[in-house]
Image (cartoon, rainbow, N blue to C red):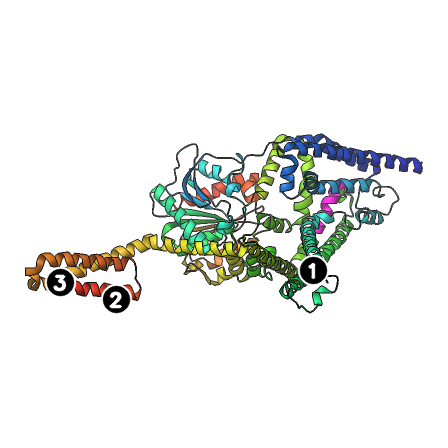
Amino acid sequence: MFPPFRLDPATLLGEVSAFQRKLSAGFPNLAHQPEPEYANTPREAVYREDKLTLWHMKGQGKPTAKTPTLIVYALVNTVWMTDLQEDRSLVRNLLEQGEDIYLLDWGYPDGADRWLTLDDYINGYLDRCVDAVRKAAGVEAINLLGICQGGTFSLCYAATHASKVKNLVTMVTPVDFQTPDNMLSSWSREVDVDRFVDTVGNIPAELLNWVYLTLKPVRLNQQKYVGLVDILDNPKELQNFLRMERWIFDSPDQAGEAFREFIKEFYQQNKLIKGEIVIGGKPVDLGMITQPVLNIFAEQDHLVPPDASRALGRHVGTTDYTQLAFKGGHIGIYVSSRAQREVPPAIHQWLSTRN
Amino acid sequence: MAEQASDLLKEYQAMAQQSWDAWTRYLQQQAGTATPFGTAAHAASGGSGDDLLARSMAAIKGYGEWLQGAVGSGLGQSGADWQQSLQHLFGSLGGQPFAHAFASIDSEAARSFGQMWQSWLQASQGAMPGARFDMEHMAAFGYTRERQLQQQALAAAMQEYLEWSGRYQALIQRANTEGFERLQAKLAELTDTTRQVESLKALYDLWVDGAEEAYAQIALSEEFRHAYGEMVNAQSRVRELQRQQLDVFCRELGMPTRSEVSALGKRLQELRREVRVGASPEAADEVAALRAEVATLKRELAGRDAPAKLPAKKPATRSAKRSMEEDEAVVRRPKPAAAVAARKSVVRGATRTRK
């Protein structure tokens, strides 16, 4: 039997000294850092409406894919997670594989958008963006790649606008909103969301960021920043860290009415898998999705537990359903080194056999 | 010898503290000059530069202090009881060495929210004669009766919020305590030389694992869900009552209220939806189909009446043209009953003209 430590006073002093030295030497670097840039892959705005912009992303060469793919991001945070930095960009990787990529950038809602509903977002904005892509590419139907809440929107859209969607890819997308390990769902269950939205109007991004941080409070509020000390002397790593911080905290407010509907009908009542969602008078039945579906989820996802995504396989109507489990988390699925190697090629390969 | 070692430790800790203070001051100076708007920008964003910086630095500062505490905790010293040393180390800062990691954002938010409303209440009480009594339960009367009732409701809501916030904080505290217990259990399992903890950072990481596990278990419990929901609901209630009071003040000053602006926004969105429906491709298709149908019917009608109407061809055509146009206008835009009746009389008039 041994004690659990192999430490002595000299080792402890050495470790504390080293920490202090790293901190003292590294902090001046932090003070002089420029605002980190995203990858900024060349792009062209092909459609604008209210706050949103539809971007056509430009690769080095012409796309070889015949069917364009529209990336539909969540309303929380920004779509630039998919084009975060040059060597960690889902968009760049897909362009290099020959895909024709469009991005839906929802923008930053303000008071004028307080009453936007899910109908406005899905049957309005999203539908008009899909039409714009169809028109630009000269095709009847396009591929949708929905991410997180954007994946849920894409499912709703594909179920009600089948003729405009050729293939559907969902990434870290919640479908069953009440799996036992879903912390966000558990917390939302007893919140009087009507009173909440009536009181605050649009949901402040800062408030949502707080909620996300409290899902793993010690790791996200402290351990992450303790780790920062180790990279203060590495300019590249430091820029990468600060870029991620920029993305995490650079988030839009949520349009109050759409938030109310999403929390009530999806989180609190779990209506999507019950086939009870109605958006703009159109019933959303996942069984009506008969297009090929590729469902990608992250095995260590703390925001959308894997089981919440896996549920899609049990409810979707298509006979061409593929599921891909990624070893990583909700963010790592876009930005980790492993993700760069595994995810874009898998999407491209799957799409190329269905173009 | 022991005294010498103790002096050495004290000197080291003093030096480390000086080092910490020095770079903190340095960073604060850098931050102060980093923004062209200086203090004004910080004030506008809700806090002084030092205050915001301190919040961002709290994680690293907490870890640095913990490291310094570890040096004097007895950990790693031969003959020392490791469990006692550990207890001393993690209990040295009020039993919550990393309490801010669990609850710092929440505490800040909750505290500032609480302070804000307490200030509000105090200001309101100061303006109201008799407020030193048990205002919350006083019978309301007199010409300020309505305002008294509002204040009572606000005080009661604030009290309720503080109660639920307290329960929430108690659960956070329990997670902190259980996190330490889990750390002890994890350490107790490390009983062979190949798995011993060899650095303070490794010990810290092990504690983070235990703390997150404990937190996750509590955060997914029914008790937490209830406390969380009630805390949010109570806070919404306070905000709702405050907004009602603000609306009253705004009306008295002739200023637009939040409710009025919100109502305008709602009507605007409804109007936009109606306009879109009217201008949608579906609506245009419907109108085109109806026009074609009307034209067909008119051709049929003209063919049937043709032999009898030949002598009065010219005037009849002009009238019929007008009639057709009016009919189409009706199809384009549904009219109220009175307008339809008027249209019918015009048609009748045209028929008389033909005669």
Q: Nearer the viewer, residue A279 or B212?
A: A279
| SS label for mark 2 | helix
- Amino acid type, mark 2: Ala
Give the CA separation, mark 2 to mark 3. Answer: 19 Å
Foreground residue, A213 or B121? Answer: B121
Q: The residue under label 3 is which amino acid type?
A: Thr
Q: Are marks 1 and 3 in contact (CB under 8 Å)?
A: no
**Residue A174 placed where, x, y %?**
52, 54
- What residue is disc 3 on? B353
Residue B206 painted magenta: yes
Q: Element type at marker 3?
A: helix
Residue on which the image places disc 1: B128
Instruction: State which chain disc 2 sits on.
Output: B
Q: Quadrant of the C terminus of chain B?
A: bottom left
Whether A287 is among the magenta residues is: no
Region rendered in magenta: B197-211
